[in-house]
Image (cartoon, helix red, strand yellow):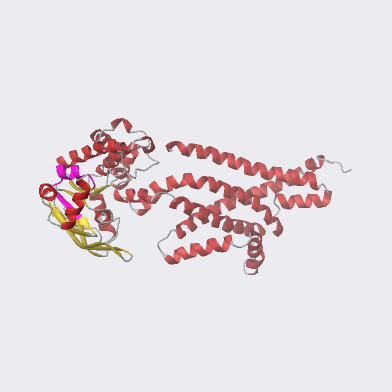
């Protein structure tokens, strides 16, 4: 019978830490750029200008209806024909565009869920559209945006494992290598799953705390 | 103070305002009544540009509301608006609701804005609610805070869009009392309402609208005792005799 040997983990601990660092780095960058994409996308989607609105629609529909793996391969190998992209840059680009499309929808829905009377009341006391959005609509929308946004961030961390296919030395890639040399598949993949779990779960705990703080006016 | 000249508006194929002209002088209280769907709320909302118009012109204190963005912005600062659903800013305390306009739009200091706000809260009778959130207030209290919020901008005109329609019956009086006091202080007011008692007691003039047009206007005594138009008579017999 196969005996388990978790001692193997200690031996490969440094390279797993490197992989973890890479996963965190790619995830954090993609969360930042993805959120920026999402904010831009949301304002495109609610724009009064039909051209801008159409750009937002095409972006969201295109990304949401193609597989992330294909997007990663397209950006790295496809765009790689024209631009010299490192595998890390390509990964961050792909994950940012991908999560940006979902974040677009999360932010748009949050903004549009605020009753239009709030906007009208802001205008009626002389605010500009920008002031109404910034001081009245967004602060209320943020409470509704935050929970699904956190969910999207967690999805992104987990989806980042796909970038191992373009040889980014993230957690998943490192794990594959260790398994090939040691054949300790059970121990290694279990440990890697725990790492992903800890990353995702600590993020959702942090967001839950933030939500509670924002809930004071309810 | 307010002049509407030949104002028309459509929602798609539906004509909601048909060539409406009206004038309201400074200090005048005009009550607009009519069946639902007659265009009275829309009429009110065109005065501060919450609804665009297809044709005609509206001026508030000489400013053409629908001319361009700048004049629209100016006109809105001269007109306070009170909504049927109160529309208080839910994420702000009562005091912050009232100081929002003076601070963000008129760029007054926090101290100055808060002084104005506290005075107004006394005036509308809820000084003790300054630091609570709107969700903790009754409907009547919310509407009185909404009136204070509008007054904080020192408007020359106050527009009331069915201010008591969403209230429980026992709270209607407290809101109407605040409005009566405002009228007595000489505020120019246009009030869309179903409160016939208020119209009779406070209005300088009652305007009856139906199907997007003003069909009759008169001082309350004449309006209620001797309505001239057949549609007015039908409407009054329905709302008064029960």
Camera-side residue of A98 and B123: B123
Question: Which residues are drawn in magenta?
Answer: B193-208
Task: Judge whether residue B186 can be spotted in this image.
Answer: no
Q: Which of B68 and B229 is in front in this view?
A: B229
Q: How many circles with numbers are drawn on the protein?
A: 0
Name the quadrant containing residue B48.
bottom left
Instruction: Name, please, the residue furthest toward the bottom.
Output: A82
State left or right for residue B29 relative to residue A141.
left
Q: Where is residue B121 in the image (x, y as percent from the top left)?
A: 27, 35
Residue B22: say if magenta: no
| Residue at image location 44% in from the left, 51% down from the top | A111
Percent of width and height locating residue B230? 16, 57
**Which residue occupies 57% across, 58% down?**
A97
Residue A78, image x, y percentages: 65, 67
Q: Where is residue A99 in the image (x, y as percent from the top left)?
A: 57, 55
Q: In this view of the protein, can residue B65 be seen by the observer?
A: yes
Image height of B65 relative to B225, above or below: below
Residue B20 horizontal side relative to residue B137, left or right: left
Relative horizontal placement of residue A14, taking residue B168 as reference (left or right): right
């Amino acid at each position: 019978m196969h005996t388990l040997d978790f001692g193997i983990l200690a031996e490969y601990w440094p390279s797993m830490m490197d992989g973890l660092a890479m996963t965190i780095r790619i995830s954090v960058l993609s969360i930042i750029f993805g959120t920026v994409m999402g904010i831009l996308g949301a304002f495109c989607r609610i724009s009064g200008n039909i051209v801008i609105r159409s750009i937002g629609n095409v972006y969201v529909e295109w990304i949401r209806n193609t597989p992330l793996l294909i997007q990663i391969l397209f950006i790295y190998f496809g765009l790689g024909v024209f631009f010299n992209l490192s595998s890390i840059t390509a990964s961050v680009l792909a994950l940012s565009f991908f999560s940006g499309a979902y974040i677009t929808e999360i932010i748009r829905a949050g903004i549009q869920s605020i009753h239009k009377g709030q906007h009208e009341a802001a205008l009626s006391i002389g605010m500009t559209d920008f002031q109404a959005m910034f001081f009245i609509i967004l602060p209320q929308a943020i409470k509704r945006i935050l929970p699904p946004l956190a969910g999207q961030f967690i999805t992104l961390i987990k989806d980042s494992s796909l970038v191992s296919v373009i040889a980014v030395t993230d957690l998943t890639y490192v794990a594959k290598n260790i398994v090939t040399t040691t054949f300790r598949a059970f121990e290694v993949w279990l440990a890697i799953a725990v790492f992903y779990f800890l990353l995702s779960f600590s993020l959702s705990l942090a967001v839950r705390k933030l939500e509670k703080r924002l809930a004071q006016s309810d | 103070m307010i002049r509407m000249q030949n104002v028309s508006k459509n929602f798609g194929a539906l004509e909601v305002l048909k060539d409406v002209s009206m004038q309201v002088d400074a200090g005048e209280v005009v009550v607009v009544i009519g069946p639902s769907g007659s265009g009275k709320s829309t009429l009110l909302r065109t005065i501060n540009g919450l609804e665009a118009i297809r044709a005609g012109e509206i001026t508030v204190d000489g400013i053409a509301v629908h001319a361009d963005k700048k004049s629209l912005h100016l006109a809105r600062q001269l007109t306070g608006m009170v909504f049927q659903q109160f529309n208080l800013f839910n994420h702000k305390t009562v005091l912050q609701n009232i100081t929002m306009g003076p601070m963000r739009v008129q760029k007054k200091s926090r101290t100055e804005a808060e002084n104005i706000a506290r005075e107004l809260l006394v005036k509308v009778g809820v000084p003790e609610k300054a630091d609570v959130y709107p969700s903790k207030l009754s409907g009547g209290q919310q509407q009185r805070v909404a009136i204070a919020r509008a007054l904080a901008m020192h408007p020359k005109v106050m527009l009331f869009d069915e201010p008591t329609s969403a209230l429980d019956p026992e709270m209607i009086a407290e809101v109407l009392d605040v409005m009566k006091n405002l009228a007595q202080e000489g505020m120019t007011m246009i009030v869309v309402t179903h409160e016939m008692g208020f119209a009779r007691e406070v209005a300088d003039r009652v305007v009856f609208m139906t199907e997007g047009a003003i069909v009759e206007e008169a001082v309350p005594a004449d309006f209620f005792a001797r309505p001239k138009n057949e549609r007015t008579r039908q409407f009054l017999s329905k709302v008064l005799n029960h």
